Image (spheres, coloured by chain):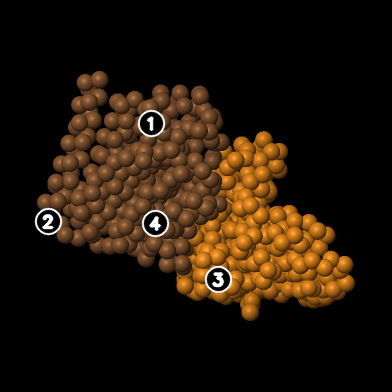
Chain colours: A orange, B brown
Amino acid sequence: MKSILLLLSTFFIFISESLSQSNTSQQAQKFVIVLHGGVGTISKSMPDSLKAQYLNSMAEALTIGKKILQQGGTSLDAVEKVVRYLEDDPMFNAGKGAVYTADGSHELDASIMDGRNLSCGAVASVRNIKNPISLARLVMEKTSHVLLVGDGAESFGKKMNVEFVPNNYFDTPRRYEQWLNFNKQEIKGTVGCVALDIYGNLAAATSTGGMVNKMPGRVGDSPIIGAGTYADNQTCAVSCSGKGELFIKHSVAYSIAALMKYKNYSLKEAANEIIREKITQGDGGLIAVDKDGNYIITYNTSGMFRGAANSSGLFEIKIWE
Amino acid sequence: MKSILLLLSTFFIFISESLSQSNTSQQAQKFVIVLHGGVGTISKSMPDSLKAQYLNSMAEALTIGKKILQQGGTSLDAVEKVVRYLEDDPMFNAGKGAVYTADGSHELDASIMDGRNLSCGAVASVRNIKNPISLARLVMEKTSHVLLVGDGAESFGKKMNVEFVPNNYFDTPRRYEQWLNFNKQEIKGTVGCVALDIYGNLAAATSTGGMVNKMPGRVGDSPIIGAGTYADNQTCAVSCSGKGELFIKHSVAYSIAALMKYKNYSLKEAANEIIREKITQGDGGLIAVDKDGNYIITYNTSGMFRGAANSSGLFEIKIWE
């Protein structure tokens, strides 16, 4: 119990330190970063030690992104690096810690989008790429394509010299247990990040292991530009989490941008309307930031792992509320 | 030359016959069907025999769809059957006749959507499925997923007992030639169909072999709901053709529906604005039909293979103009 308290107190000290760092920062320009680690039925009776692990991990990830933005880095770098950290952390359903497919292996999806010019890249159904989000970025930057899947995506990864791992690298006892006791109320994990940098550029990134027990080859919304991820400097950057099929059929990420562009909705109005009207109760949520630095975190599940920081000193990590 | 003239005259007789059939039809309820066989740099100096083959094939396909709708069939059946016919025809870049990838093989993508309830299904990067559009429909109807890719999609196809073919079934001398002499001005082939049935239900379907010389694993807009295909009874049904990456980054198919829903644009205004403002000259087009039976065919390439028929007797096949 002592170790748990120590972890929790470290976390709270860490937050307030980040706040004071931000307040004394020389950087006057505005930046915002928001991350998520998935939505779902997240029990409030989760052991304190586990809760602390989640909070600590998200705080670490958020700090990585915040520092990049604070030091004048781009939103594109920030969202990639944050998602990469979350992929490497076995707590979340993306990269290491990805859920199991129906045949007991792992297939990963990711996408990234640059709001400056709508450049985007994605990979789906990859099995041996340690960091799908970085391969998605390479698809965006090094090919004329947007989406590469399966073996073709892996061959491209080889050419790009990205890190390969055997599929069982993604194994974790917790996800294995979850797969054995699979039911539809499980956490709908995904990780994602959206950011506005000091240059006024938006970016979004999303990465996932998909749904527990999914059919091999199933691709959800995470690697689909317009469904799970969207970023356009004219409107907003969005990353979704939830029942991917619903997010695809409603083009959720793009529809937030469309409501802002075509109906002059605020980001908050757009995001809330889409989640309320299009996503059935318990099936998802999203994070988004607009070109003016407003952000929203909205979901209709019992919880969402998330964090937000900005240039005005905000540094917040939450699971419920 | 005699045989060419015979073919052409058969075609024109065939059209006028279809018109008179339609005029004497007992069916009072409104239906509309529009198909396309791809956009691109289509030379007007194409040999008459080749032109006649295209026109005949599209007339056959359109007749299949028209008959289904005339006899009270659903728009979903009509679009699937029309696309299936075009997949089987080696003239078009979908199914038999698909273009070659950079490694000299074929990878196919398709999607279908039911405007009644936004149900949708898609497959991408399949190599041995004779009719990807029918497998996409099975994904929609027999799974809880929307998109299956690669080997996973093929395994599902085996369970569903769909017809398998060796990858070289898709070989055609014309596409092989095209691949050897690959340049970016080639036809951007795709096939698609949209329809409104007498019950007021919209549906859309799209199928393709993708871009000539694409990287293995590359997936374009055709199997992406919201990008290459969309159908919603509240607004319209859309099927796109062109440079897929552009259609993905602008969520083109869904954005037509969004402009109608959020800005009260007519179908024509919405489709023309998106093609004009989002798709660079020479890069694509689309067909769409709205809930009231208005339809549009719009493209910024030199031509588009297409046809349209409705319950008022229209039966038209065109390549240019």
Asked if A122 appears above or below B43 in the picture, the reply is: below
* B187 on left or right of A139: left
Q: Chain of mark 1?
A: B
Q: Which residue is under mark 4?
A: B268
Estimate how packed mark 2 is, as few (under 14), some (14 to 19) or many (20 or more) residues with alpha carbons within 10 Å: few
Q: Chain of mark 2?
A: B
Q: Chain of mark 4?
A: B
Q: Which residue is under mark 2?
A: B26
In the image, farthest residue toward the bottom: A321
Disc 4 vs disc 1: Cβ atoms closer than 8 Å?
Answer: no
Q: Distance from label 4 to label 1 (Cα)?
A: 26 Å
Estimate how packed mark 3 is, as few (under 14), some (14 to 19) or many (20 or more) residues with alpha carbons within 10 Å: some
Asked if A284 appears above or below B202 in the picture, the reply is: below
Q: Distance from label 4 to label 3 (Cα)?
A: 22 Å
- The amino acid marked with disc number 2 is Gln
Q: Distance from label 2 to label 4 (Cα)?
A: 30 Å
Q: Which residue is under mark 1?
A: B44
* B89 on left or right of A62: left
Nearer to us of marks 3 and 2 is 3
The image quadrant that residue B146 belongs to is bottom left
- The amino acid marked with disc number 4 is Lys
Q: Which residue is under mark 3?
A: A264
Disc 2 vs disc 4: Cβ atoms closer than 8 Å?
Answer: no
Q: Are marks 3 and 2 on the same chain?
A: no
